[in-house]
Amino acid sequence: MNLYVFTHTLGRATRTTVSLCLGTASFFYIVLYGSSTFYGNSAPDIPWLRDPPRGMRAMLGGTADFLHAAGWLSTGMSHPITLALFTSGALTVAVGGVAGEIERGTIEFVLTRPVTRRRYLTAIAAAALVVVTAVQLSGLLVTLLARQTVDGVDQLGVAQVLRPFAGSWLLFAAISQVSLLVSATVSLRGRALALSAGFVVLSFFANFAAMMIDQLSGLRLASVFHYVQPATLLNGHGLTDLAMPAAVGVVALAIALVLFGRRDIVR
Amino acid sequence: MSHAVEVEDLVKRYGRVEAVRGVTLEVRHGETVGYLGPNAAGKTTTIRCMLGLLRPTGGSIRVLGRDVRRDLPGVLARVGHIPGEFGLWPQLTGRGCLEYLGRLHPRPPRRRAELCDSFELSAADLDRQVRFYSRGMRQKIAIIQAFQHAPELVIMDEPTEGLDPLMKERFLDLLREHRAAGGSTLMSSHILSEVEQAADRVAVLRAGRVVKEVAARDLAGDRRRHCTVTIAGPPPDPAELRLPDAVDVRVEGNTLRFDHTGVMGPLLRALAGLPVVEFLSEPESLMEAFFDIYEEDTP
């Protein structure tokens, strides 16, 4: 890994990363703060909340428990806004670091210095992981803060909170490496972004469709989202499933290194 | 001893399109070679293959004695490059760009300050974000980043694009200094007058092949001269004139015009028999010579 490429890449992503961290932190705090009105003595007695429709459960990753803090944390982690924030964190550096540099015509200055493509790409991969980590950490830290400041959220144990965030980190780290693979093989930032976002959306909807339609249940195995279920992780289960996103990330990076090493750098 | 650049039978295909078809080219140590050719002739492709940005389909490239395929970092540590089309990081300052690129090189950027002075980039200019830079200022950054490490070989693709005449002159001075210090240069350009001033040798590329490789001074020596002879009194009948090596002889009033190639002695002896008032001999420009080469090579 080239340290200068790494710090340069991170430096350029600072504003985006800070924005995503603030967005994530705000959203998690709002969700957990709002959740406190749904449980305890003030809990509304609405049957729909006890047994949400299948479509809503599928949209929120398979379960939807609105009567406990753990359910709300799980809901927060599976919410489309969260997915958008986490996906942006995973894609921003990976897409800009290779395809964006090729499109802009800056990569020539770097690759005509004695920086090997392998060291260049691993620096971008590392920077992408730092951004993913920062965004996940902002959600985790705010959740820990909510434990101290929001009634009812203190039901959540620290280890219990750590597990879904660790799973989410692995999921979006894998997505960032898939995005890096895409970026390493195309020369246009827009195309890399579209293909990477397409992978996330398809993966999400494969999981959604598998949960909605019994005949398509096997489709869930093809989705990285299937292997990271926040509600399951909060209960201390599904940890072995996390091997799948980890493997996806490692394999994507390995393929990216091979393909980027062999490709022509042309705009 | 190996040359600074040795390209042998280089082939580069993009699918079915053959961009470079067996280019053989060399740049000797301490030599400046102009690499000429029209758009899509394969100049940029050749340069990008030399720098490892493109993977050649066939042939071999050795730069400063090292095989580009086997030891690219070893090659790039000794080479400076000015790309033809490039961008800079818009949110960085000019200084930030130069510092970042400086850090990626094993040699210290010891010429940076001197080059910034020479190309009139002030501290205030360098502290502005490059998104506010003009084309010419961006080109200065590209030139400085290539030369700031005092490379042994500089490979340039249209290096004066966007520079004003004064800065072009400074750039040619920089090339002369580089050559005087023993540095080698490969310079692709459309601006033939600059190549004429800077290059020791010229390689002309056409449709992916080098069609002529010649010392720049020999190219000038072989050049046609446009001759104009003013004669006192009525001019002679062109059919009766015996002017050695003259072609395209025209009579306009008492002025005789023709083109001449080769040694002038026999021509001057022939003209001595005429009442010559004035004789003008103007060498054709490199541009015309360049197009002559193209016409010669056209099947």
Image (cartoon, coloured by chain):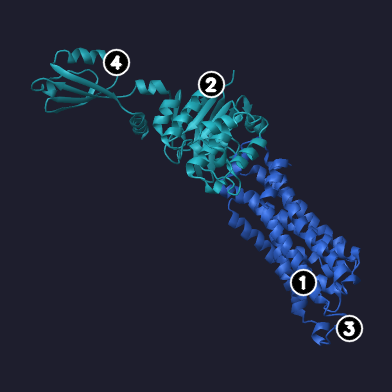
- The secondary structure type at the circle numbered 2 is loop
Q: Residue A30, which numbered label?
A: 1
Mark 3 or 2, which is nearer the eye? 3
* Residue A263 visible from this viewpoint: yes
Label drawn at residue B30: 2
**Between A146 and B172, which is closer to the camera in this rendering?**
A146
Depicted B93 relative to depicted B171: above or below: below
Tags 4 and 1 touching, CB below 8 Å: no
Residue B81, given in percent of the width and then of the height, sits at 56, 34
Q: Position of residue B291 (x, y in %)?
A: 35, 33
Give the distance between the C-alpha atoms of the residues marked 4 and 2, in whole angstroms: 31 Å
Host chain of mark 4: B
Quadrant in the picture for the N terminus of chain A: top right
x and y, in percent, of residue A141 in the image: 82, 62
- Residue A41's tag is 3
Location of residue B25 with respect to B84 vertically, above or below: above
Q: Mark 3 lies on which chain?
A: A
Q: Which label belongs to residue A45?
A: none
User: Is there a contact, CB below 8 Å, between mark 1 and mark 3?
Assistant: no
Decide: few, some or many residues near mark 3? Use Cα within 10 Å; few <14, some 14-19, many ≥20. Answer: few
Which residue is tagged 4? B263
Q: Is residue B27 visible?
A: no
Q: Which element type, helix, strand or loop, lies under badge 4?
A: loop
The kind of residue tagged 1 is: Ile
Q: What residue type is labelled 4?
A: Val
Q: Tell me the SS state at disc 3.
A: helix
Q: Is residue B31 above or below residue A6?
A: above
